[in-house]
């Protein structure tokens, strides 16, 4: 163990015993990625496994952060210790929005909760590793539930949302919002639907659209298989309306998961995805290293001189990578 390992272990020990600043520092390490992040993730993994992971997803501006703030408020009042990881697909230009979210949510939250925004700027591959690590870190620090707010666009985001224990999909009244959610693959991962901004015109139409789409799922046998139909809850998060019903729906879904044994299934899916993402990134970086090596250059020349095909080149590099890894 070197000095870095030691200081990470120390941060971890203090974080799990309630030191908020240590937790914040560890999240920064996770966000930066690399070897130190892997060490944190490994430590967190050993102590995690208790928290209920809730994904909240939907289009930008649908009111996810406002709604999450409402939930946090209620959970904390009920004696719970929730944490939130808000994953923001910020471009360098809109980076300010992260801080905006954090401050707004922090206004609602107290000492018993922990809120953190994670920038996804630049590295989409990093997100796939950082999010599960952060979830497990919150879990290890005994925050429960762990809420992940993600924008419901892009595969990584849908994956993150889809592997939560309970996934809440937020839609708003407006032309074809529910249809958009369906296209993004969000309908399949939803355990609970929230029609937020129900103070706006068209909320009932959106509800009806969702109901219809659920009926179609019913036809394909989706509902029979699981015995669970996602409820549709109307909310006005500006006023806090609907928050109580959403918490009840989350509780109901949790009971459904325990009764049906699906808790283990979700946990398994989440772990499988984490390993797969790590594997793909590992193989990806190993192959680009191999391509840039001297041997890689030689093979490239062979292909350029048409002595071997690109496919043969790839197979030959793959075999040498496997030889090196084992
Ligand atoms: N009218 C109305 N506005 C809302 C409601 N919930 C959130 N908003 C507003 O919608 C905007 C986007 O909300 P935000 O929570 O940042 O959305 P996010 O991008 O999904 O996290 C903000 O201006 C909120 O004040 C609601 O229920 N009704
Ligand atoms: Mg937000």
Image (cartoon, grey):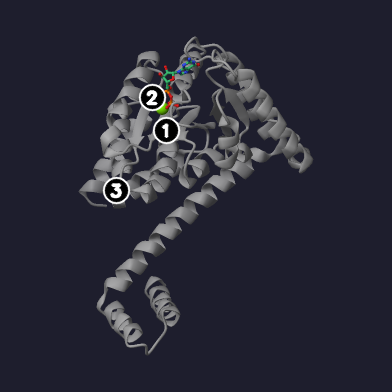
Q: Earlier in the sequence, mark 2 or mark 1?
A: 2
Give the x, y percent position of residue 147: 48, 29
Give the x, y percent position of residue 314: 42, 76
- Ligand 1, seen in the image, is in the quarter at top left
Of residues 101 and 248, the one nearer the viewer is: 101
C-beta proximity under 8 Å, tags 2 and 1: yes
Residue count near mark 1 (Cα–Cα under 10 Å), binned few <14, some 14–19, many ≥20: many
C-beta proximity under 8 Å, tags 3 and 2: no
In this figure, which residue is indicated by the disc labeled 2?
A: 114
Give the x, y percent position of residue 243: 55, 16
**Residue at the outermost front position:** 175
The part of the image, by quadrant, that contains residue 192 is top right
Q: Residue at x 30, y 77 (%)?
A: 296
Element at label 3: helix
Q: Residue at x 35, y 18 (%)?
A: 104
Quadrant assignment for the C terminus: bottom left
Name the mark on residue 36: 3
Give the x, y percent position of residue 232: 65, 24
The part of the image, by quadrant, that contains residue 257 is top right
| Above/below status of 286 relative to 81 | below
| Above/below status of 289 relative to 297 | above
Name the mark on residue 203: none
In this figure, which residue is indicated by the disc labeled 1?
A: 138
């Amino acid at each position: 163990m070197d000095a870095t390992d030691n200081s990470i272990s120390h941060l971890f020990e203090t974080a799990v015993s309630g030191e908020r600043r240590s937790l914040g520092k560890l999240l920064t390490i996770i966000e930066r990625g690399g070897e130190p992040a892997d060490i944190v993730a490994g430590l967190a993994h050993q102590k995690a496994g208790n928290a209920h992971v809730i994904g909240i997803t939907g289009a930008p501006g649908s009111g996810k952060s406002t709604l999450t703030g409402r939930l946090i408020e209620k959970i904390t009042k009920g004696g719970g210790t929730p944490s939130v990881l808000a994953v923001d697909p910020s471009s360098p230009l809109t980076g300010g929005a992260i801080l905006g979210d954090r401050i707004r949510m922090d206004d609602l939250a107290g000492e018993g909760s922990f809120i953190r925004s994670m920038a996804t700027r630049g590295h989409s591959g990093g997100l796939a590793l950082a999010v599960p690590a952060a979830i497990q870190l919150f879990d290890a620090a005994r925050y429960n539930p762990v809420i992940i707010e993600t924008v419901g666009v892009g595969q990584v985001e849908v994956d993150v949302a889809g592997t939560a224990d309970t996934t809440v999909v937020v839609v708003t009244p407006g032309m074809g919002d529910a249809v958009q959610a369906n296209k993004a693959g969000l309908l399949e991962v939803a355990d609970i639907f929230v029609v937020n901004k129900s103070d706006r015109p068209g909320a009932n139409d959106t509800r009806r659209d969702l109901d219809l789409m659920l009926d179609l799922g019913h036809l394909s046998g989706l509902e029979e298989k699981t015995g669970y139909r996602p409820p549709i809850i109307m909310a006005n998060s500006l006023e806090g309306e609907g928050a109580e019903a959403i918490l009840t729906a989350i509780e109901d879904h949790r009971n459904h998961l325990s009764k049906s044994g699906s808790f283990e299934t979700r946990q398994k899916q989440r772990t499988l995805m984490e390993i797969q993402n790590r594997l793909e990134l590992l193989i990806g970086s190993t192959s680009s290293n191999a391509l840039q090596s001297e041997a890689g250059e030689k093979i490239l020349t062979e292909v350029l001189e048409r002595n071997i095909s690109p496919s043969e080149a790839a197979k030959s590099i793959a075999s040498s990578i496997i030889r090196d890894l084992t």
